[in-house]
């Protein structure tokens, strides 16, 4: 066998890359290929923050390949058409790629397999590239997937993970294969001012620094909004510049309660992917039945816009929404409480919030985003679907001195201590604050939510 194609998708790295290793082991030459998928763009998923981070990732991947004697081939358009064209140009026998879990990815894989087989070529799809444990590798008795995290995690933790693979020393790419230049971040407009850089090089540096340092405090501090004591590795996991398998191995070697808590969060990611793999419709439909009385546009237009803009009158909600707009990223505790506020306190359809998050999140992963929203909204896998997070109590607990609020809501910068979480209770100085009154009374919002659930 002379030539194989490796189709990179959400696995933009050289370390621990099973499709690339298999291609190199079985072929004399390999074409590393990335296709800007027109189907993804047409679906509105290629938003500025992810496009900019992707540009960083592709540039770094190309540089890594060139350092090994190769290069990245970049094309744009329909993935099946472009892969077929590259395979024909190089007379490739096989194509290797990572598996994925969305309905769109499944359809794309089926189309590609059929097209290649019709031309006498083979498609190899590799698991445990974007997950530590493959979807479907562990299942409960009588069901195709786990719907509750705790028993899933128990089985997940018992799985023996494959050993991580080293990055290749050299990659020989056949000459004459046409390519677009890798995109550049500077060509992308509309990105968040504080958007982090992408790429495997940056991701590996962040991972090493995290495991050598702050992970030790993760169990105690992961909900600390002001302390920002999380790994911030989610964008690298989304784009696959880091391997979940390698991260779990390295975190377990680091050891301790913090590393254990961090590994548990990686298991949550795999949990959601196995749910979506089994139920692709959950990307847009309720995983569990609901009364479908959600408020939507235009009925709740003003409340939705206030939530999007971070002008709800509840400081910790507004701080988190403004962090999202500025960084293209939000602290996980912020994601939970802002989602609860929209879906339960305002009783707005979770899909409205999920779509807004996907329009800005650099780590906007379909499985994690949609299924976390459903978990919060009470339509997903939460065993307590009626729980409602109180933003005032959440603020006091996870931002006790108000430092997170003051960082992101400058109108409240002069309000001292925990009083910042209830500015409506201030004395005469309240009139001088350019900050809105609460959008809704929390008790009224809770009563509306409970009435709706009783009707359901």
Image (cartoon, rainbow, N blue to C red):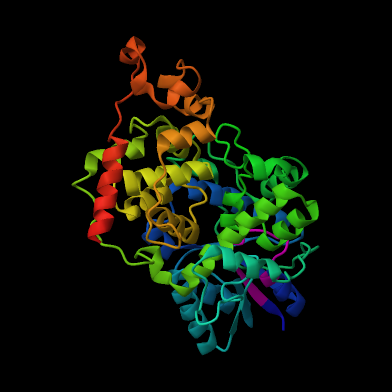
Q: Where's residue 274, x and y in %?
A: 53, 69
- Residue at 72% across, 64% down: 16
- Residue at 79% across, 63% down: 166
Res 165 → quadrant: bottom right
Q: Where's residue 344, x and y in %?
A: 33, 48
Q: Where's residue 382, x and y in %?
A: 45, 59
What is the magenta range?
Answer: 4-19
Q: Where's residue 140, x and y in %?
A: 55, 77
Residue 436 seen: yes
Residue placed most toward the observer, 383 or 303: 383
Residue 329 seen: no
Q: Quadrant of the C terminus?
A: bottom left
| 304 sits to left or right of 51 | left
Farthest left residue in view: 299
- Residue at 30% across, 63% down: 290
Residue placed most toward the observer, 129 or 320: 320
């Amino acid at each position: 066998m002379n030539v194989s194609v490796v189709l990179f998708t959400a696995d933009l790295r050289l370390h621990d890359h099973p499709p690339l290793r298999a291609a190199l082991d079985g072929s004399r030459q390999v074409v590393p290929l990335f296709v800007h998928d027109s189907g993804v763009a047409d679906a509105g998923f290629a938003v500025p923050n992810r496009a900019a981070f992707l540009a960083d990732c592709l540039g770094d991947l190309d540089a890594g390949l060139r350092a090994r004697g190769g290069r990245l081939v970049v094309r744009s358009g329909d993935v099946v058409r472009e892969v077929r064209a590259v395979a024909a140009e190089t007379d490739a026998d096989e194509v290797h790629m990572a598996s994925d879990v969305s309905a769109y990815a499944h359809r794309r894989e089926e189309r590609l397999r059929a097209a290649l087989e019709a031309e006498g070529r083979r498609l190899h799809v590799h698991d445990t590239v974007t997950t530590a444990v493959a979807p479907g590798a562990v299942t409960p008795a009588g069901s195709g997937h786990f719907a509750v995290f705790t028993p899933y995690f128990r089985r997940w933790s018992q799985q023996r993970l494959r050993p991580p693979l080293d990055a290749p020393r050299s990659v020989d790419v056949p000459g004459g294969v046409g390519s677009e230049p890798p995109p550049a971040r500077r060509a992308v407009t509309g990105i968040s001012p504080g958007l982090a850089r992408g790429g495997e090089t940056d991701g590996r540096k962040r991972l090493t620094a995290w495991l050598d340092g702050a992970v030790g405090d993760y169990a105690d501090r992961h909900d600390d909004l002001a302390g920002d004591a999380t790994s911030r590795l989610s964008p690298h996991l989304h784009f696959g510049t880091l391997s979940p398998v390698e991260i779990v191995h390295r975190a377990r070697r680091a050891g301790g309660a913090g590393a254990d808590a961090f590994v548990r969060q990686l298991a949550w990611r795999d949990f959601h992917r196995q749910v979506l793999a089994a139920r692709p419709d959950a990307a847009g439909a309720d995983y569990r039945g609901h009364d479908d009385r959600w408020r939507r546009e235009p009925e709740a237009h003003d409340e939705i816009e206030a939530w999007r803009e971070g002008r709800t009158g509840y400081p910790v909600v507004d701080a988190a929404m403004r962090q999202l707009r500025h960084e293209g990223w939000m602290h996980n505790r912020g994601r939970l409480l802002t989602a609860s506020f929209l879906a339960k306190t305002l009783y707005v359809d979770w899909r409205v919030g999920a779509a807004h998050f996907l329009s800005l999140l650099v780590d906007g992963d379909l499985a994690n985003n949609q299924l976390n929203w459903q978990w919060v909204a009470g339509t997903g896998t939460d065993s307590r679907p009626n729980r409602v997070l109180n933003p005032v109590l959440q603020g006091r607990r996870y931002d006790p001195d108000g430092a997170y609020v003051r960082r992101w809501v400058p109108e409240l910068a002069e309000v001292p201590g925990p009083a910042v979480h209830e500015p409506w209770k201030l004395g005469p100085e309240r009139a001088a604050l350019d900050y809105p009154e609460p959008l809704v009374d929390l008790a009224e919002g809770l009563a509306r939510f409970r009435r709706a659930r009783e009707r359901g």
